[in-house]
Amino acid sequence: MTQPTSHPLYRPDIDGLRALAVLLVVGYHAFPTQLKSGFIGVDVFFVISGYLISTIIFTNLSAGTFSFVNFYQRRINRIFPALSLVLISCLAFGWFALLPSEFKQLGQHLAGGAAFVSNFVLWRESGYFDSLAETKPLLHLWSLAIEEQFYILWPAILWLTFRFKQSWLVVIAIVLGLSFALNLTSAYADPSYTFYSPQTRFWELLIGAIVAYATLYGRYPQAFLRYQTALSNLLSLGALVIFAAAVWLINQNRVFPGAWALLPTLAAALFIAAGPQAWVNRTVLSRPLLVWLGLISYPLYLWHWPLLAFQRIIEGEAATLIARVITVALSVLLAWVTYRFVETPVRQNTRNRPYVLLLCVAMTIIGAAGLYTKARDGLNARHQINEQVASLKQYSETFDENPLCRESYPRFQGAYCFKSKPGEPTLQILGDSHANRLIMGLSQLTNENILHLSHHSCPQFLNLAVHVLSRTDVCAKFNLQALDVALNTESIKTVIMTFRGPLYIGNHGGTVSLVSNPKQQDVKTVISTVMRKTLDQLLARHKTIIFVFDNPEINFDIKTCVDARSVNAQSSNIRTNCAVSRAQYDAHHREYRTLMQSILKDYPAVKIVDGAKVFCDTDYCYASKNGEVLYTDFDHLSLAGATLVAKEIIHALQK
C-alpha cells in the first residue's frame, strides 16, 4: 500500500493485486452488507508491503548500498504527502462539521495518525461504550500505523542479521512463527488486542518477506526450472482459488485475524510468488484499469473512509445507496488528483532532502494541532453549538460509581458500584449499563437506598458467562458477587432486573455460555437456564422482583434530534421525527421478548414493566418527547428517558 512503484523491481501485476485489495476495503466500508469479507484487503496489503520492503532491503544490503537515511527518506516521500493532505482536510472539515466532543476525538486520532500510533489509540478506545466505528474519520489509519511500525523495526533487524552473518531466512521464520502463534492464542481471548497489535500482525508482512527471500535467493532444482512456466501458472491459479474462498467464507462472525487470515495472506503470497508472467498475473492483474487503481490505491485508501465517516456523521444515520456510490466516486477522483499532483511531483523530485524536512515539519505541526484540539476539549468556543446530549451523557456517568459504594463493597471491582445513600441498601438493580441508567430516574422518585454492583455488558444471572468485548468471560465473577449480595442481604427487599436483551438474543453481537458447561452456547437455552435459576433463588429468599423489558434502540445519531451542528446533509438541522418505526422495534426485539415472556409466564409473582409501553405507540418508538431527549446514544437512556421508566417501576411497586 505504501511502496514505491518506479524502482527497478516494479511489477504491474502487484499494482493489480493492490487494486483488488483496495476494492475489497472500499467495497466493505461503503457496502458492508453486500461485501462482508472486504476487510481482508488490508491483509493483502500487509503481504505486499512486507514483500516489497524486504526486497528493497535484501537487494541493497547484498549490494552494499543500504542506507538507513535513504530508506527512511524514501518512506517519508512516499507516505507523508498524501497523508498530510488528508489529515489537514479532515481537521478543516471537522472544524465546521463536528461537535466539540467529536472534534476532541478527531484531534486525538489526528495526533495518533501523524505519529503512526493510531492502532494503539484505537485499541485503548475499543470497548462497550466506544462510539460507532462509522463515526471515526481516521479509524482506517490503524493499518498504516502497523506498516510504519514494521518499517521502523524490520530494516534494523535485517541489518543486524546481515552484520553478524546470520541467516535471514531463520530470523524471518522465528519472528513470523512467534507473531503467528501470538495471533492464534490471542484471537479468541482478546480480539481487540489481536486486531490492533503489531505483534499479532507482523506475521502477515513477514509472509511477504519470505516470498521476497525465496524470489531473490531461492535455489531450485533443474526439474523445477524445466517446468517453471507451468508451476507459475499453477501457483497463480491456486492463489485465485484461495482468494475466492477467502472472499466467500470470511465475514465478521469469524474469529479474525486468527487462522482465517491465512487465506488472504496465502493467496497474496502465491500471486506474488507466481511472478509477472503467470497467466492470471499477466492477463488479469496486469490489465491497465487494475494497474491504474493500484497506482492510486494508497491515496484512495486514505480518502475513502473519512468521506464515508463524515457523511455518516452529518446525516446522523447510514447514507442511501446512491449517496455512498457518489462518495466512492469522489474518493477515486480525489485519489487520482492526489496521486497526480501531490505524490508524483514529490517522488520525481531529485532534490529529496528539502522535501523530507518540510514533510516532517508539516507532520509535526499536524500532530501538535491534534493534541491541542484534544487538550482544549474540541475547541468548544468555535460555534454556539447545542451539546445537550453530551451533557446528559456526562450527567449519567455520575451514577456509575461513588466512594460510598466502594467503601461498602471494597472487594467488588466491576465498572459499576453505586449506592445512593449511607446505610444498608434496600433495593438492588441487577443488570448491565441499561440497568445502571435507571438509577438516575429512581433516585429522584424513591427514598429507597439503591445499590448497583455490575459491569457493562453483563446481564446478571447465576452461572452465566458472557463474551462481548472479548472471547473470554468478563461477567461470571461480577455476577456471582452481586447476586450473593442480593440474595444474602436482608435489608434488600426489592430487586429490579433488566439487561440489553436483543444484544444477546437474536444474534446481534453478544455470545453467552454456562459457567458449569462452557460448551453449551445456545443462547436461548443458556438464558432460560440461568434466568430461571436466578429467579428461583431470589423468590426463595422472599425478594420482590420487577423485570423491566429493555428500552428500544435507535438507528440514528441522537444529536440530530436537536439543533446540534452547523453542517448537516438534511434540509433542516433538526430531525423532524426523532423516532424509529414500531415495526423496526418489533423485529429487533422479537426473539428477546418471546424468550422473556416464555420464562416469565412461569413466574406470576414477578412484576413486569414494559419499555415498549413507555416509549412506543402503534407507529413509532420515540427518542424525544415534549422537547426532551430520551437517549444519550443509540441505546442508553438519558435522565428524561430513565425517569419515564422509573415512574412505571414505582407504579408497579405500589400495586
Image (cartoon, rainbow, N blue to C red):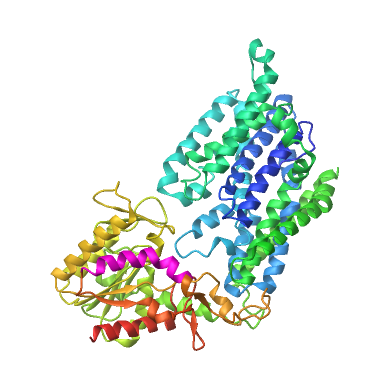
- Main secondary structure type of the part rendered in magenta: helix
Asked if residue 364 is positioned above or below residue 73 in the image, the reply reads below
Q: Residue at x 72, y 62 (%)?
A: 88
Residue 585, magenta (yes or no): yes
Q: Residue pushed farthest bottom?
A: 626
Residue 408 or residue 503, whichever sits in front: 503
Residue 294: image x %, image y %? 73, 43
Residue 285 or residue 450, whichever sits in front: 285
Residue 358, magenta (yes or no): no
Identify the image quadrant of residue 384.
Answer: bottom right
Residue 563 or residue 124, whichever sits in front: 563
Number of numbered tags placed on the structure image? 0
* Residue 640 in view: yes
Quadrant including the N terminus = top right
* Residue 116 in view: no
Which region of the structure is painted magenta?
584-602
Q: Residue at x 28, y 78 (%)?
A: 450
Give left or right: position of 435 versus 515.
right
Residue 576: image x %, image y %? 59, 82
Quadrant including the C terminus = bottom left
Residue 127 or residue 607, whichever sits in front: 607
Identify the image quadrant of residue 604.
Answer: bottom left
Residue 58: image x %, image y %? 68, 29
Residue 480: image x %, image y %? 24, 61
